[in-house]
Amino acid sequence: MAVLGCIADDFTGASDAASFLVKGGMSVRLYNGIPDQPALEKGPDRHHSPDRPDDAQAIVIALKSRTQETSRAVADSLRAARFLLAQGVKQIYFKYCSTFDSTPKGNIGPVADALMDLMKAPYTLLCPALPVNGRTVEHGMLLVNDVPLHESHMKNHPLTPMWDCRIDKLMEPQSRYECRCLTTEEVEHFSPGSLEQVLGSPLYLIPDYKEPEDGSRIAAAFGHLPLLTGGSGLLEPLAQMWTNRLSSEGHIPESGTDGKALLLAGSCSKATLGQIAWYQSQGKPCYKLDPAAMLDGKQTLEDAWQFIETHSSSPDTVLVYSSDTPEKVKEFQKLGIEKVADMLEGTTARLAVRAVEQGYTRIISAGGETSGAVTKGLGFSSYWMGESVAPGVPIMVPAERPDIRLILKSGNFGQEDFFGRALTMTSK
């Protein structure tokens, strides 16, 4: 039975969270959306059904709440929490991005408030840090590679441009509750009694988290809480804490599989642009989706598929990408932000679906929205989580298709040679 349940605000965030739980030693089942409870009870072989969470030590539910309308985001998150509690979990973790992707009218505050109310929690954490990927918190300020959040690349994010680095100020327009920052020393000597003077209403604590080792201190001080919120950085030490208490080891699926691969990229992050450039520098086949040409009918899905088919007998894997520089993105957005995004994401998803229909067994996707469209198109309901290609980027095995390997990464994650590593790790 699962002891930890995680609610993530998008799919790549969910896979990111799951990867750190696996790294901490837990077996993890990730669900794309809230499982249908009646479906979990179906079938004579209930323990081996792809929809049974019984064998997982942690359950992660991927929602689409990051940019949803707020009331829907809150309702979905509460429904996910109630599902997890019904499965018997002892702890719920609300996972959001380590760069706090959220506008002043965003959903992190409303969802966290609602979960606090549901769990009747007097206090919890706001802990977005992920030091291994350069996201740290110091004196309540969120830094990206030592640069204040609102001065980093996140100031130009097309959906959630960041306007401040102070986490309490980011929460102020979103939450009904106050925030309090904790230094590393205060974390080490924390006791609930120290909050008695300020616990008139629920409270958020923002711990300093500058080094990976700080995560163990935070988990030791707050790992007993029934509700925690943050990025994926805290999940590995939490998983280690739970693993030490559990009697059985978690099952981790094999990374490699037979069959062809397809690379897809839609993120316009600096990291993904660098990964595309690296792949191109290796002389590999790459095909660019051009929004203007697609809207004019000069480029189609069939053109992209024909390029893939032309190289199907080659040992080199095709990369299809729509990623571009911030300047180009602004140009394309003049054509209609939602129209362009929907067209590119839809095209990428249809390419992934067609590839699987044609026998491809490895799909590797870069970008949160792109990966969300791919998972929706493929339609798998749940995944077992394997080892990671990069911090926060696991190899995923659909429970319904154990021959397939999916890798879905957030745009900012991964090494320069990420695509090469992913192909090597998923091949037999």
Image (spheres, rainbow, N blue to C red):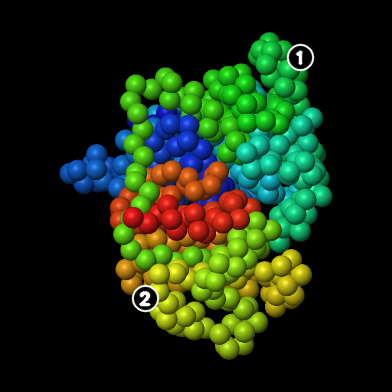
Q: Which mark is residue 197?
A: 1
Looking at the rendered image, the quarter that the N terminus falls into is top left
Residue at position x 68%, y 42% in the image: 134
Residue 178 in sight from this viewpoint: no
Q: Position of residue 374 (x, y in %)?
A: 47, 63
- Kindly indicate the quadrant of the structure image that contains residue 193: top right
Q: Position of residue 60 (x, y in %)?
A: 46, 41
Question: SS for tag 1?
Answer: loop
Q: Amino acid at mark 2?
A: Ser
In the visual, does 308 lie left or right of 361?
A: right
Looking at the rendered image, the quarter that the C terminus falls into is bottom left
Residue beneath label 2, please?
A: 313
In the visual, does 241 lie left or right of 167?
A: left
- Kindly indicate the quadrant of the structure image that contains residue 333: bottom right
Residue at position x 33%, y 25% in the image: 248
Answer few, some or many: residues within 10 Å of disc 2's Cα (few below 14, many 20 plus, some between 14 and 19): few
Answer few, some or many: residues within 10 Å of disc 1's Cα (few below 14, many 20 plus, some between 14 and 19): few
